[in-house]
Amino acid sequence: MPSALTDLCRYPIVQAPMAGGASCPQLAAAVSEAGGLGFLAAGYKTADGMYQEVQQLRSLTARPFGVNLFIPQPGQADAAAVEVYRQQLAGEAAWYETPLGDPDAGRDDGYDAKLAILLDDPVPVVSFTFGCPAPDTVAALARVGTRTVVTVTGPDEARAAERAGADAVCVQGVEAGGHQGTHRDDPETECSGTGLLALITQVREAVGLPMLAAGGLMRGGQIAAVLAAGAEAAQLGTAFLVCPESGADPLHKRAVTDPLFTHTELTRAFSGRPARGLVNRFVREHGPYAPAAYPEVHHLTSGLRKAAARAKDPQGMALWAGQGHRLARELPAGQLVEVLRSELRSALEAPALRGVS
């Protein structure tokens, strides 16, 4: 990993920050201890909740780790469209016997408070999703010794990250599970995402920043492929989702490899932003009608998702997963890092990839 990220981990394997509970301190610690780079997801948590998780992670490992923040969303969603969707979800609220959430519960995800904590008590890496931080924010983090990574889904977003002074970009292909980290949510382009290998090349030719590669990666051979394409490391989410250390709901873990769930698709059904998940009843019934309204829809459906989990009903849950979900292996996180490293080494020793590092 000949880049600004060289000394953060022994192997070019990064555990993706998965908001919603999966990326807990136990998972991040296990990955970092095994030689990868573990990440906490601050999204949807309070500032104090994030701080407590950072402290817990530090008690579990002395190795480097990262924290991911959501950039506050500009503007306001179409209130009329949100109200129509609320009415459509009334039947779900009745079925799960839980009220719909308040769509106006907040748009900034406690960004300023979380940033203040991370400046006062620095961590090795902070990554950003749903936008690019201001240059003065990047500079402030650099002054306290924190490296910054910006999630990008295209060359223009990568150029914005470079102008802001970021240390690296996380190049997210359309294959990735969970939310697409686009800087601007444009309904007209939501289904036109670029595949990871093509995107790595586009970004590599647009900027000189080190790249993490994310999107459907489940095997060491795939990691070798993105390294050969120009990335310095691979970021895997779904691969770690099913590990015993993951904080994901057991129903979610089982669904990832359950033959009942045959494929994934991008949907706004649960959050109002495009996110890739397993296709279940909720996605089929509500996905076509969900408005471009993040985080309003996220707040609306929060109670429904929790109620579905309590009812042991995966058909009403947000089952985020990447396109490679059927390749998931239920291994302890440290063992998975070792298996990926072994597969990577074997792939790099193949004649076609010999010399890639």
Image (cartoon, helix red, strand yellow):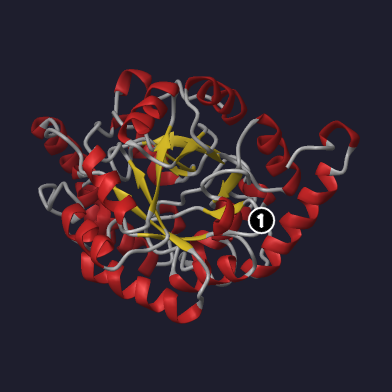
Residue 48 place in picture, x, y as percent: 22, 71
Query: Tag count in the figure?
Result: 1
Residue 95 seen in render: no
Q: Residues within 10 Å of mark 1 (few under 14, many from 20)?
A: many
Quarter location, residue 324: top right
Residue drawn at point x = 38 percent, y = 38 percent: 181
Left or right, 202 with reference to 44: right
Q: What is the x, y in percent for residue 137?
A: 24, 46
* Residue visible at 55% across and 39% down in the picture: 215
What residue is rendered at 26% in x and 56% in y?
Answer: 302
Residue 132 coordinates in the image, percent (x, y): 30, 37
- Asked if residue 196 lies left or right of residue 247, the reply is right
| Left or right relative to 81: residue 64 | right
Q: Nearer the viewer, residue 37 or 124?
A: 124
Q: Residue furthest front?
A: 143
Furthest residue in direction right, as rendered = 351
- Residue 32 in view in this figure: yes
Along the line of sight, which residue is nearer the eye, 110 or 9? 9
- Residue extending farthest to the bottom is 59
Q: Secondary structure at mark 1?
A: loop
The residue that mark 1 highlights is 11
Image quarter (top left, top right, bottom left or bottom right) of the C terminus: top right
What amino acid type is highlighted by mark number 1?
Answer: Tyr
Who is closer to the viewer here, 10 or 296?
A: 10
